Amino acid sequence: MKSPDAFPTLKQLNLLLALVDSDGIASAGARLGMTPSATSHALRALEATLGTAVVNRNAPGVELTYAGQQILRHVRDVFAALRLIQTTAATSAGLKAGLLRIGSFGTSSSLTLLPPLLAGFQERYPGVEVSVTEKTDLEIEQDLTARRIEIGVVTLPKPQFDTLPLAVDDLVAVVPERHELADTDPIDLRDLGRHPFILTHAGSQELIACMFARAGIQPKVTHELQQLNSLLEFVAQGHGVSIVASLALPNRHDGAVYRRITPRSSRRVGLACLNEGRLSPAGAALWRQARTMHTRAE
């Protein structure tokens, strides 16, 4: 029988977190530097302390029991609180130290929105280490929920989070500079749809698909590319036309030109966090700076 005063250790709880992103119990322990024997012992000790199984051992992979899934949410809260304690302690004297984890959904935010924001922040708080991870918009949502990052740059709206608008990002046409549409501005979406189309697999893919769907147009997709530089070069070489979010584009790319599109389509971009009122001191400082910059820009 478990003792009513017994609590799981942080090592045991950390193992539970590692299990979620692993393909086996042993591999989860290995991520934490534990041997298979130590991992098995820690898992059994955790379940004995809790008085319930947290892993379904009959499942083909790692599958948490219902109790394990419910406990996992609180475990994430525990580690979020511990990080907040560490950050608060380290930054209490004028934000002289600390770590701020940020997620960025792609080129638009990483190249255009974040640099001026972080430049001002790190000039004011040089001792705070900022770590930026670039993933898809959906992955940023998941990392926020799992507390792997504190703040994310995302497309809006995101009603499940506290958010702060930063910019409106128009979608623009990218065509070869010698293309028949190069001298047209704005370009009708129906005209773009008549030419071979190069589809981006970056952050604006879903918005572009909705744009064509609303207009009842089926684009002639001939290439699907992940990297922006590859897409721009394919356009410049005359392999097709494309649509890209304007904030993601460099000022110019040899052989390609940018044109507005009619009907206009845009997306809103902003910061997101789980709870604005519970940000770490470093996170709260960045949030305040972003709000000030956005207010000045309006």
Image (cartoon, rainbow, N blue to C red):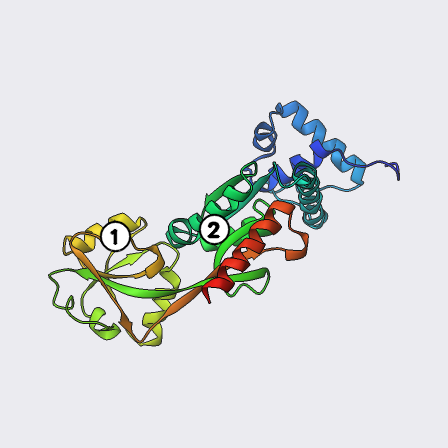
> Is residue 275 visible in this depiction of the protein?
no
Left/right placement of residue 146 relative to residue 70 reads left
Q: Residue at x 46, y 67 (%)?
A: 298
Residue highlighted by disc 1: 231
Amino acid type of the residue tagged 2 in the rendering: Leu
From where the camera sits, is residue 3 visible?
Answer: yes
Q: Judge left or right: residue 194 versus residue 142.
A: left
Q: Please tell me the numbered disc located at residue 117.
A: 2
At 54% from the left edge and 59% from the top edge, which residue is drawn? 291
Q: What's the residue at 47%, 43% (across, down)?
A: 133
The part of the image, by quadrant, that contains residue 3 is top right
Please name whichever residue, 81 or 86, is drawn nearer the observer in this view of the structure. Answer: 86
Residue 159, image x and y in percent?
Answer: 57, 65
Snapshot quadrant of residue 49: top right
Image spot of residue 118 (x, y percent): 48, 47
Where disc 2 sits, the SS reads helix
Mark 2 Cα within 10 Å, few/some/many (few <14, many 20+)? some
Q: Nearer the viewer, residue 150 or 98?
A: 98
Left or right of 50, for residue 123: left
